[in-house]
Amino acid sequence: MSFQFRWNEYADQPHNVALRKERFRYHLKHTGSYFSLIGSNLRRAVPVLSLYRKYRKRMYKEPVSIGSPFALSVSPHKEKPEEVLSLLRETGIRKTLVRVPSWEREKLGEYEKFFERLLQDGFEVTAALLQQRDDVLDPLKWQDFLEEVYSRFKESVSYFEIGHAWNRTKWGLWNYKEYLQLALTALDLSEKYGVRLVGPAVIDFEFHLYPPLLKAVPFDKVSSLLYVDRMGAPENKQSGWDTSRKVALLKAVIDGTCRRERDLWITEVNWPLEGTGKYSPAAGRPNVSEEEQANYMVRYYILCLASGFVERIYWWQLVAPGYGLVDSRETPWRKRPGYYAFKTMVGRLEQSTFTGKMPFTGKMLHSRAMIFSFQRGKEDFAVCWTNDGPCDYVFERRIIRVIGRDGDEIPVKDNRVQIDASPKYVFFDVD
């Protein structure tokens, strides 16, 4: 089945041009592939669920070295390339991801120049290779694209992510076997060119797709586009699963399938912004205020990283009107609250060690407050918030400093901190 591929340049994603009844007919015709997925998952259900229970028991109870997991997706900008690079440098991150669409082969020279600039500034580059329907219908076209990308970028790109959100039909694929066809071609050529691969780039809470793909393709890093935006806050549940449980389950599925522990990257996540109209990649419920986006972003990062199951998270993306940390519709470009929150988070948590989550000694007036403790060098601090209304918390340890989500100093009295939806960094006297 084929349909016209149309790109939405405002929201940075394809238009969904296939009719609903057309999609239904196709899926009905290929029910056999879904039964094979069921069989693949049933065979691993018991060991995966056993591993999940093991992971849940240790989650947030063991020290976790945070390292350098903070990363940003960025796009080349013809008009203001230097401003993009300046904004990147200011965040303090050193890892970037750039999308390279298969239908933009004529622009590979521009991407090459952009990669060279990123490298000159000390940034690591991962290239996400985007597919469309023609790449499935014309395998040689996809192969030629890979050959050119690998040969041109192998010295400047550390990893190539194969495909993108392919479990959504608007991205051109209709079942996992079509993605497998693209991924196996990428794997064969990766050996020829000596490049490292990331995948399978499944979007959302569809973990049943991992077993058949990971058995067939030995990706160097396993990736997920683990969005939770439709649930609002990252602590909210989808059919009983919040972000923490999803991360533990995903890691169990991956490790159980591969029969060894694998590195997991989240290569895309964001919350689209309300009031941005055609620039928002989603309609209705997922759209949030700029303040909510900043809060949810920090909380999502901490929930995932403190679990010990996620090695790296790329926020999508630095500059974008409908969801980015910077709004490019204004002159000069406007840094949103999320930009300052991201910069503060990187500055405080990079190279830290997570040492534990509640219980925390003190007088707490709210049972649903989240308090995560960290150490870095001589610093001993906690990051705290709540998803259920503000509350007061009186710490028994002497507080020497409180920093707000965006890096602002907050006065403190009597070791009492008001905990609310906006994460705060609470530093303690270590003497």
Image: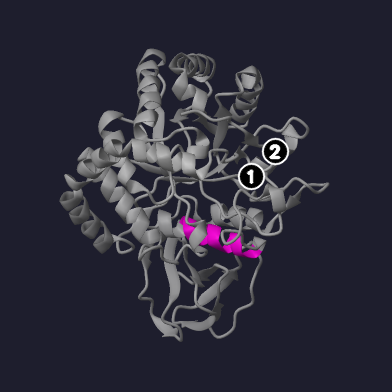
Which one is nearer the viewer's eye here, 275 or 195?
275
Is 14 placed left or right of 277 in the picture?
left
| Magenta span | 291-301
Instruction: Please give the residue where the numbered disc 1 appears in the rendered image.
Output: 318
Spatial distance from mark 1 to mark 2, Cα to Cα?
8 Å
Q: Quadrant of residue 36?
A: top left
Vertically, is 272 above or below 197?
below
Vertically, is 181 above or below 269?
above
Q: Is residue 21 visible?
A: yes
Question: Dot 2: within a 10 Å radius of its alpha carbon, few (fewer than 14), some, or many (20 or more) residues?
Answer: some
Residue 70 position within the rendered picture, expressed as x and y whole percent measured from the top left: 51, 47
**Residue at horizontal 57%, vertical 45%?**
316
- The amino acid type of the residue labelled 2 equals Val
Q: Which mark is residue 84?
A: 2
Q: Main secondary structure of the magenta part?
A: helix
Q: Are marks 1 and 2 in contact (CB under 8 Å)?
A: yes
Residue 280 position within the rendered picture, expressed as x and y whole percent measured from the top left: 65, 50
Vertically, is 355 above or below 10?
below
Disc 2 secondary structure class: helix
Is 338 placed left or right of 253 in the picture?
right
